[in-house]
């Protein structure tokens, strides 16, 4: 219902005589088309009329939409929600029909070749951000498409991996680095003609960008050169010696084991620990750091070294990987 003033009603009614206008208003109230707003008070005339009224809007006829949902939709769209909420279908109809047209164009029993989320979004709705930032997710949920990436055959993209290839021979050890400074320093070390870092002849350095590696590495098979995907390659990880850095390693290792085992670069961590002994006071860890680690990381170290690392963490301190520089490698 919407609110309307007596003056607006008078203009629309176009009754020159006030008595005729009153008869018209009373008839509208009796039929339920108008309802007085009693808080607006009367106009002071005889017979009296209220200064404002509620106008009852006519019920929309959605019967054609019901037929459309039952008989014109792809079987990949679940129409149950919209049959219960035809008014919502009227609002979403343009977008649902675009999705339906796309699904009906697919050959029977065949899935579309995978493309990126934004590419599929534009293909279906003509808007590249419709799935990511607009109403696409709501539309898909109402259509019963819960696993959109699988059902619409798209993949989400992440920032491409930044890496340095010292050589492309296989098999080779690859090293993932948490922080940018260490990546640059180790790259410079190799560019200066050195063939190994702490005795390991790395062929490739990968910049992980902290937690960013967890998402980027999911696209590993798509965004790297073929030699890096060789199954016989060894993949190592090196980051800060703190709960967060260890947590990144453990989540990365868990996500890709056993198909692609990832181990800590123990030689680098060992040198961090040795160099930390000469530091008067190690920096303190950030507050509210997630301390949930499984212990997988420590299993790669002898008991004495693992205990020394745990003691540093439990004291509230940490060792940044920047404790090492190009002169240490």
Image (tube, helix red, strand yellow):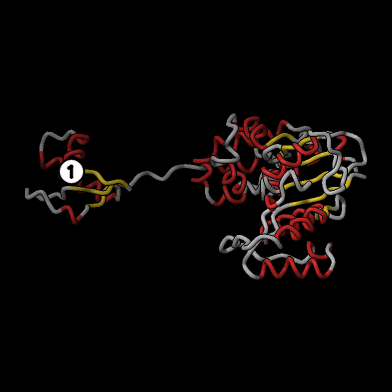
- Residue 97 makes an appearance in the image: yes
Q: Is residue 49 left or right of residue 289?
A: left
Q: Is residue 151 left or right of residue 131?
A: right
Nearer-the-camera pick, 224 or 115:
224
Q: Position of residue 6 (x, y in %)?
A: 18, 43
Q: Is residue 229 left or right of residue 124?
A: right
Q: Please determine whether, in this image, residue 32 is positioned above or below residue 154.
A: below
Q: Residue at x 77, y 70 (%)?
A: 307
Q: Position of residue 216 (x, y in %)?
A: 72, 43
Count how many numbered circles sit on residues in the image: 1
What residue is disc 1 on?
6
Nearer-the-camera pick, 323 or 54:
323
Q: Is residue 133 left or right of residue 145?
A: left
Q: Position of residue 99 (x, y in %)?
A: 63, 36
Q: Residue at x 35, y 44 (%)?
A: 57
Q: Position of residue 35 (x, y in %)?
A: 25, 51
Q: Secondary structure at mark 1?
A: helix
Nearer-the-camera pick, 95 or 78:
95
User: Is disc 1 surrounded by few (<14), some (14 to 19) or many (20+) residues within 10 Å?
Assistant: some
Q: Residue at x 60, y 35 (%)?
A: 97
- Residue 148 makes an appearance in the image: no
Q: Residue furthest left?
A: 45
């Amino acid at each position: 219902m919407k609110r309307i003033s007596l003056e607006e009603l008078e203009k629309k009614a176009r009754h020159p005589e006030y008595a005729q206008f009153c008869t018209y208003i009373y008839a509208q109230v009796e039929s339920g088309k108008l309802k007085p707003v009693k808080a607006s008070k009367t106009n002071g005339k005889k017979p009296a009329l209220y200064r404002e009224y509620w106008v009852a809007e006519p019920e929309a006829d959605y019967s054609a939409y019901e037929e459309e949902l039952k008989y014109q939709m792809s079987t990949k769209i679940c129409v149950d929600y919209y049959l219960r909420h035809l008014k919502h279908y009227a609002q979403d109809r343009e977008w649902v029909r675009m999705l339906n047209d796309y699904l009906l164009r697919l050959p029977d029993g065949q899935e579309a070749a995978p493309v990126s989320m934004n590419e599929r979004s534009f293909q279906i709705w003509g808007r590249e951000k419709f799935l990511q930032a607009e109403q696409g997710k709501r539309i898909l949920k109402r259509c019963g498409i819960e696993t959109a990436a699988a059902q619409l055959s798209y993949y989400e993209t992440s920032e491409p991996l930044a890496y340095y290839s010292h050589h492309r021979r296989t098999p080779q050890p690859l090293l993932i680095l948490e922080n940018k400074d260490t990546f640059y320093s180790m790259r410079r070390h190799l560019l200066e003609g050195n063939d190994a870092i702490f005795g390991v002849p790395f062929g490739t350095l990968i910049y992980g960008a902290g937690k960013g590696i967890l998402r980027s590495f999911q696209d590993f098979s798509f965004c790297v050169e073929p030699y890096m995907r060789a199954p016989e390659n060894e993949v190592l990880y090196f980051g800060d010696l703190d709960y967060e850095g260890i947590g990144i390693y453990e989540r990365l290792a868990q996500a890709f084991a056993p198909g692609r085992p990832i181990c800590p670069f123990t030689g680098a961590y060992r040198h961090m620990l040795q160099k930390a002994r000469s530091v008067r006071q190690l920096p303190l860890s950030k507050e509210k750091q997630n301390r949930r680690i499984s212990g997988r990381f420590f299993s790669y170290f002898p008991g004495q070294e693992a205990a020394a690392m745990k003691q540093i963490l439990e004291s509230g301190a940490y060792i940044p990987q920047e404790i090492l520089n190009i002169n240490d490698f």
